C-alpha cells in the first residue's frame, strides 16, 4: 500500500470511530486509530458513508441521476390503427390492385401517391373513402363494395405445363406458359392492372391439371385457402397399386417435407378411395383433403413408395370442374 493511501485509510478510520462514538453519546476515545480498518478498507469506506449520512453531513457528494434512455427499437415502429383506418399495403391488396408484396415494392419504387403526395411507408395509415390513393399506370384505387357487388369467381381448367404465376418474367417459367397467357379472353383482361384484379386462389403445380379458381376478392381467397375450411378433391393415377397398409397410412396422416428443409408435422387425416385397380401395376385413387401444402399429394405418395403418373383436381368446396374442357374457363354460377 502506498504511503498516501495508508495515511488516507488511517484518517478515514479515525473519522469513522469518532462519529460512531458521537452518535452513541460516548466521549471520544484517545485511541481513535483502532487498527481494524487497516485490514478491511472497503468496510471502512462504507461505514464512513453511512455515518456521515446519519449525521446529516453534506460532505458525501450525491450521485447525479441519469435520465433513463428509451430502449432502441429494432425494425419498424408498431402502428396503432385508428377506427376505419387501413395500412396502405393492405388497402391495395384488399382493393385487388396489387398483392401485399407487390404493394410494398410499388411503394418503395415511389409509384404510389396518397392525396397527391408520394408514399414511402407501406404501413402508412389511410382512411378508405376519404383519402385518394393512386398508382402510376393504374389510376385511382377504391375498395369494392362487396355488400352491393358480389365478387367474381372464375373456373379455369388448367392444363399441364402452365405455371400459376402472374409474372410474365418469372424465372420458374423456363419457357412454359403462365396463367396470364393461358387464361382465355375475356377473363385475361381482368388480371392486373385491372382493378379489382382477378388472382388465383392457391396454386396447382405445373405437372398437374384440373380446377383452378380465380377471384377478385382477397377475403374470399383467404377463406378458401385456410387449412381445415374448404375440401378439395383430386384424382390420381399411381404405380404400383397401393397396399391396404399404405392407404391406411395416407388416411391417418404422414410426415412429409414441405420444400427444402421445411417440416410442418404430419398431414391432416384425409379420405383416400381406390376408384380403379385393374392390376398390381397401377391404380386410380380419389383424395379428399382439407389442406393444400406444397406438392402435398405427390409427397404423400412418394412417402409410401408410389409414383404419380398424372394428377387432376376435380373440386374446391362446392365448386366442381364438371365437363369444362381443358384450357377453357367460365364464371361460377349459383
Image (spheres, rainbow, N blue to C red):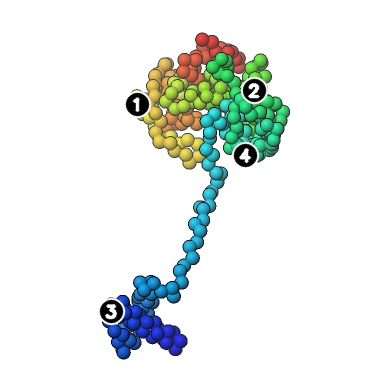
| Picture layout, residue 191 above or below residue 88 | above
Secondary structure beneath label 3:
loop
Tell me if I can see residue 82 in this picture: yes
Q: Between disc 3 and disc 1, whose residue precedes?
A: 3
Q: Residues within 10 Å of mark 3 (few under 14, many from 20)?
A: few
**Would residue 127 appear left or right of 38 to someone viewing this image?**
right
Q: Are marks 1 and 4 in contact (CB under 8 Å)?
A: no
Q: Between disc 4 and disc 3, whose residue precedes?
A: 3
Please name the residue that numbered disc 1 is placed on.
248
How far across and down, in percent of the image, does residue 232 sit?
A: 46, 21
Instruction: Give the residue furthest to the right.
Output: 137
Q: Between disc 1 and disc 2, whose residue precedes?
A: 2
Which is in the foreground here, disc 1 or disc 2?
2
Please name the residue that numbered disc 3 is placed on.
25
Q: CA distance from mark 1 to mark 2?
A: 47 Å
Location of residue 146 (image quadrant): top right
How far across and down, in percent of the image, does residue 47 sit?
A: 35, 75
Q: Residues within 10 Å of mark 2 (few under 14, many from 20)?
A: many
Which is in the foreground here, disc 1 or disc 4?
4
Please name the residue that numbered disc 4 is placed on.
121
How far across and down, in percent of the image, does residue 158 sit?
A: 58, 20
Q: Are marks 2 and 4 in contact (CB under 8 Å)?
A: no
**Would residue 234 appear left or right of 22 to someone viewing this image?**
right
Secondary structure beneath label 1:
helix
**Image mark for residue 195:** 2
Q: Residue at the spot x=48%, y=62% of the render?
A: 65
Residue sitting nearer the eye, 74 or 259: 74
Q: Between disc 1 and disc 4, whose residue precedes?
A: 4
Amino acid at each position: 500500500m502506498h504511503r498516501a493511501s495508508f495515511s488516507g485509510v488511517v484518517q478515514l478510520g479515525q473519522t469513522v470511530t469518532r462519529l460512531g462514538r458521537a452518535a452513541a453519546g460516548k466521549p471520544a476515545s484517545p485511541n481513535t486509530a483502532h487498527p481494524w480498518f487497516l485490514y478491511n478498507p472497503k468496510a471502512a469506506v462504507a461505514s464512513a458513508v453511512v455515518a456521515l449520512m446519519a449525521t446529516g453531513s453534506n460532505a458525501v457528494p450525491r450521485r447525479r441521476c441519469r435520465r433513463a434512455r428509451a430502449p432502441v427499437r429494432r425494425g419498424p415502429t408498431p402502428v396503432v390503427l385508428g377506427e376505419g383506418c387501413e395500412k396502405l399495403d393492405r388497402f391495395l391488396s384488399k382493393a385487388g390492385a396489387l398483392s401485399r408484396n407487390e404493394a410494398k415494392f410499388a411503394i418503395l419504387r415511389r409509384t404510389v401517391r396518397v392525396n397527391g403526395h408520394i408514399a414511402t411507408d407501406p404501413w402508412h395509415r389511410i382512411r378508405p373513402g376519404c383519402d385518394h390513393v393512386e398508382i402510376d399506370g393504374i389510376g385511382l384505387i377504391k375498395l369494392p363494395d362487396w355488400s352491393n357487388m358480389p365478387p367474381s369467381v372464375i373456373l379455369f381448367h388448367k392444363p399441364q405445363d402452365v405455371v400459376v404465376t402472374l409474372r410474365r418474367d418469372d424465372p420458374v417459367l423456363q419457357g412454359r406458359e403462365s396463367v396470364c397467357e393461358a387464361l382465355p379472353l375475356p377473363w385475361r383482361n381482368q388480371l392486373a392492372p385491372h382493378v379489382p384484379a382477378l388472382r388465383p386462389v392457391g396454386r396447382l403445380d405445373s405437372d398437374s391439371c384440373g380446377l383452378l379458381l380465380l377471384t377478385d376478392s382477397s377475403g374470399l381467397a383467404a377463406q378458401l385457402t385456410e387449412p381445415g375450411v374448404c375440401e378439395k378433391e383430386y384424382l390420381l393415377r399411381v404405380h404400383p397399386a397401393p397396399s391396404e397398409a399404405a392407404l391406411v397410412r395416407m388416411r391417418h396422416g404422414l410426415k412429409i417435407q414441405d420444400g427444402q428443409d421445411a417440416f410442418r408435422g404430419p398431414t391432416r387425416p384425409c379420405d383416400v378411395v381406390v376408384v380403379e385397380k385393374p392390376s398390381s401395376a397401377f391404380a386410380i385413387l380419389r383424395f379428399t383433403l382439407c389442406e393444400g401444402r406444397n406438392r402435398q399429394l405427390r409427397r404423400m405418395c412418394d412417402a409410401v413408395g408410389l409414383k404419380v403418373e398424372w394428377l387432376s383436381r376435380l373440386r374446391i368446396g362446392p365448386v366442381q370442374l364438371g365437363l369444362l374442357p381443358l384450357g377453357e374457363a367460365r364464371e361460377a354460377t349459383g
